[in-house]
Image: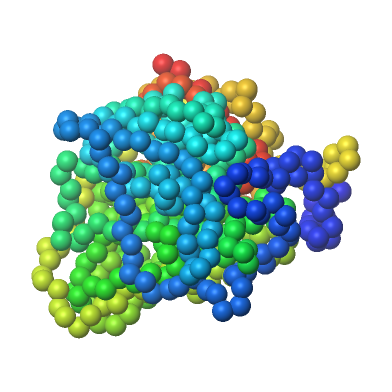
Amino acid sequence: MHRRGFLAAGLATVLVSRRAAAQMKMDNMPGMGGHAGHDMGAAPQGAAALPEGEALPEGEALRELRLLANEANTPGLLKAKLTAEPAIARYAEGIDTPILGYNGMSPGPLIEATEGDRVEITFANRIPDAASTIHWHGMPVPADQDGNPMDPVAAGSERSYSFDLPEGSAGPYWYHPHPHGKTAEQVYRGLAGVFLVKPKADPIPAEYGDTVLVFTDLRLAADGTMPDSTMVDLMNGRVGDHVLVNGQKNPALTVPFGTRRRFRLYNATNARFLRLSFDGAPMTIIGTDGGLLEAPVAADDILLSPAERLELVVSFDKPGPATLYTLDYDRGWMGAGRPADTGLTLLTVNVSETPAEPVPPLPEKLRSIAQLDSPTVNRRFVFTETMTMGATDMEMGFLINGAAFDMNRVDIVAKAGEIELWEIVNKADMDHPLHVHGTQFQVVERERDGQVSKAPYLAWKDTVNVARGETVRLLLRQERPGPRMYHCHILEHEQLGMMGIVDVQA
Ligand code: C2O
Ligand code: CU
Ligand code: CU
């Protein structure tokens, strides 16, 4: 069947392929509550499915993320334990939600280290019946320490991850599971946390503070459990009903007027695109996925696609509320149920009449970034979505260069230290944020309908949105040998095939 015609026919008539059905049938985890009997098509998107009179509380004081305790007493060493396990969260009064947490928490504990440090983290997988891993998203760690799907940690077992953080690696990274076929579910059920690598000397004035804002996306059924994913979720990526900040809905922060605040924004949702602005407070971008820019850049609005991060300095110069809210962004949606995602208030900053102590200005130069240049290898990756009639039913796939992910296949071979030009061509009907493991890259330009636009600033990134119909060119160099994943960070698309392996050879 022609795909357009198929789409027009509406998703209600779709026969779920056996592959997708198997993926939708989530494990009935002991201790995860009795959600086995949920209607898979329940929970209309854009509306909370909580019972009448129940809503997620808003306006509570913004919680800071709990710091992961360092068990080592040696300077330069971070030694700690992370356990992935079932836990109970209380998002609304009187309603218990079974989740997966790191050390019982979602978002997981905040990991803080300094460039040059050694990190040794023991990971215990206490998720009943499911393998897991910890992937250190964006971090320059050896391939065999990076939590690849090829290195699963079986349910009930442990392993340790150790790596050294190179000088110059300061940045806003994060960690999440990456087991084969299970990443999307483990992340939406709660497993994701922040890993901040701090520089030895920070050019951003300490008076600006350092506030992490992690966005996650929650869908709750009437009984407080998280419903399993539907066919629509698998196609578009699972979007929830509530965007949370550090686990809270629209929390509040009070600051004196004249405050300048440093925020680190994390899109840790499975599939939600966040186009954001602060109403009544000017934003300046100071950093991206891989750390600081060379110089601050003023911004009216920002787009954070799934897995991207941005660092901002926001000036609160007017007494009264300043809200962080979502603007319209069309990332392409298949079928019905496009979520309401415009005009959501994510965070309210109450700017008081009391003036702040004067603070130093933001430096004009933050650091220098060596520009990658003169690639010796050119590669092209074409993203497509397919729907084909299988032997008995409809099969859908998200493909890179015509192939779905195969854990036993190396897609490309690269050489450590060589600069490559990657051209990502999105021929699909949805945006797909490309992420590459093990390194940071530099976006050169975007092309759409023959129009080329250069990247607005030089920056280190590990995730870049490739809008539908767009081509993105980027420069990249892998320094460490071993197999690395590259994939769409809409985690359901990763699961349905939009991932490949680059084997980096020494
Ligand atoms: Cu956030 Cu393959 O990773
Ligand atoms: Cu990653
Ligand atoms: Cu995708």
Could you tell me residue 259's position as x and y percent? 20, 70
Which residue is most to the right?
Answer: 392
What residue is at 26 percent from the left and 73 percent from the top? 254
Q: Give the quarter of the figure containing the C terminus.
A: top left
Q: Is residue 472 left or right of residue 198?
A: right
What residue is at 40 percent from the left and 44 percent from the top? 103
Q: Is residue 320 left or right of residue 38?
A: left
Could you tell me residue 63's position as x and y percent? 33, 62
What residue is at 70 percent from the left and 47 percent from the top? 24
Q: Nearer the viewer, residue 316 or 448?
A: 316
Looking at the image, residue 336 lies above or below residue 370: below
Could you tell me residue 457's position as x and y percent? 35, 51
What residue is at 25 percent from the left and 57 percent from the top? 210
Q: Is residue 195 left or right of residue 361?
A: right
Q: Is residue 390 left or right of residue 291?
A: right
Looking at the image, residue 38 lies above or below residue 250: above
Exactly how many numbered labels are in the figure? Answer: 0
Could you tell me residue 80's position as x and y percent? 31, 35
Q: Nearer the viewer, residue 63 or 230?
A: 63
Residue 407, image quadrant = top right
Looking at the image, residue 308 lies above or below residue 220: above
Q: Check the image and tell me how it is coloured.
A: rainbow
Report whether residue 21 is seen.
yes
